[in-house]
Image (cartoon, rainbow, N blue to C red):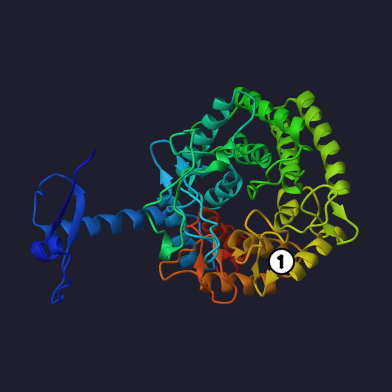
Amino acid sequence: QQTLRLQTDASVSHVISHEPFLLTREHNFLLGPDETLEGGVGDTARHFEQETLAYWREWTRRLALPLEWQDAVIRAAITLKLSVFEDTGAIVAAMTTSIPEAPGTQRNWDYRYCWLRDAFFVVRALNSLAEVSTMEDYLGWLTNAVVGANGGHVQPLFGIGLERELPERLCENLPGYRGMGPVRVGNQAQEHFQHDVYGNIVLAAAQAFHDKRLLHPAGLAEFERLEAVGAQAVKIFDKPDAGMWELRTRARVHTSSALMCWAACDRLAKIAHTLELPGRATHWQQHAAHMRERILTESWSEERQAFAESFGGRDLDASVLLMAEVGIIDPMDPRFIATLKALEEHLCDGPYMRRYEAPDDFGTPETAFNICTFWRIDALARIGRVDEARAIFETMLAARNPLGMLSEDTHAVTGEMWGNFPQTYSMVGIINAAVRLSAAWDTVI
C-alpha cells in the first residue's frame, strides 16, 4: 500500500474536520507521495503549475493542426495524450467506470482498459497530428498484444499492462454515479469473440510499414506476424460474433465484423506490395476480393434499401458507415448513399446518431453514441454534403464540457453527457472530423 500526503496552506483543522470554511484568499493543495516538500506549499504549487504549462505548450507546438478548430483539436489531443499509460504505450478507452450510458438503464461498464476497436481511429488521429512518439509507443503496445495471441483468437480488450484476465464484479457498497448503480470493476467483454479486432489490428499496424519517421519501422518479420492475424480473419469473417457493440446475449454475422476482416486482408495485400512480395500480395488480394463480394451481397437489405447490421438481416446499425471509411465501397455508390439516408431516417435524433435500432440486452438504446455521430459527419463529407457535416460538427463541439471534453454518449433532448468520460473514441472523433472538414492552410497563407 502506498501512503499519500496532502499538504496545504489552508487550515488543516478545517480539512481534517470536513467542515466548510470561507475562502478569503488563494489556497493550494498538493496531494502526492509521503515526502516533505523542499519549499513552501504556495511556492511549490506555483512552480508545479508553471512547469505543467510549459510542458503542454511545448508539446502542442509540435502538433500538426488543421487551419480551423485548432483550440478544439488541441484540447482533444491533450486529452488523448493524458489517456496514455507511458510504461507500455497503452491508451485507455476512458478514465472512469460505470457512468451509465443513459439515466437509470444499468448500462454501466468499466472502460479503464484498452480496446482494440479503438486502434485504427487512434492511429489515424495521432498520425494526423504528427504525434509520432505517442503513435509509435501505441503501435508497440499493439504489437505485443498480437504476439501474445500466438496467431489464434485475440480478445477485444486488455489491461494497460496487457493483462488478459479482467473478471467483472459488482461493488455492492458503492451507490454509483448520481445513485445510478451498479458500479462494475472489470469487463466481461474480455471473454467475447469480436471479429472486428483483426481488421483494427492490421489497419493500425499498417502505419509502421509505410511511415519513414518511425524509429522502428516494420519489416518482413512483423508482416509475417500480421499474416497470422489475417489468417484468423479469413477463418472467421462469416462466423457469428458479439459484434463491436459487445452484445452479451445475441450472436450474428455482423457486417462491421466481416468488413474489418476484409480490411485486414486488403491492407495485408498493400503491405506485401510495399515489401515487394508479389506472391503474398496476390494471396491476400484474392481473399479480400472473395470477402468483398459476399459482404456487399449478403449484408444488403432490399427491404430497407440499406446495408444491414448483419448478413441476411434487416436491422440498421451505424457501424456500416465504416464501409466507405475503410474503402470497401465508393462513398458515391448509390447503395452507400441510400444506406446513409436510411440511417439518418431511423437512427438520428436531429444531429445525433444512435448505434442501432434493434433492442439489446437492456432494451432499445436511448442516447446517441458520439462516435457514430462523427462517422455520420465523415460520411456526409465524403458524399459532398460538407455544409451539413460542418453544422453537425459544430453541434458536437457545443456539446463538450468547458474543458473541451466529450463523454461516450449525448442525450439528444437534454444535451446532457452520459457514459464514461472522457471517452477516447469521442476525442479522436473530434480530431479526425476537424482534419477532414477544415479548410486548407493555403487558403489563407
Say if residue 333 shows up in the picture: no
Q: From this view, report whether residue 299 is shown above or below residue 101.
A: above
Disc 1: which residue: 347
Q: Position of residue 237 (x, y in %)?
A: 76, 37
Say if residue 316 shows up in the picture: yes
Q: Position of residue 271 (x, y in %)?
A: 69, 33
Q: Name, please, the residue furthest toward the right.
A: 302
Residue at screen point 53% across, 37% down: 139
- Quadrant where the C terminus sits is bottom right
Residue type (three-letter) at the residue carrying disc 1: Leu
Residue at screen point 21% across, 49% down: 32
Graded by Cα atoms within 10 Å as few (under 14), some (14 to 19) or many (20 or more), the crowding at tag 1 reads some
Q: From this view, report whether residue 90 is shown above or below residue 176.
A: above
Q: From this view, report whether residue 412 is shown above or below residue 148.
A: below
Q: Is residue 261 left or right of residue 397?
A: right
Q: Position of residue 370 (x, y in %)?
A: 59, 62
Q: Position of residue 347 (x, y in %)?
A: 71, 66
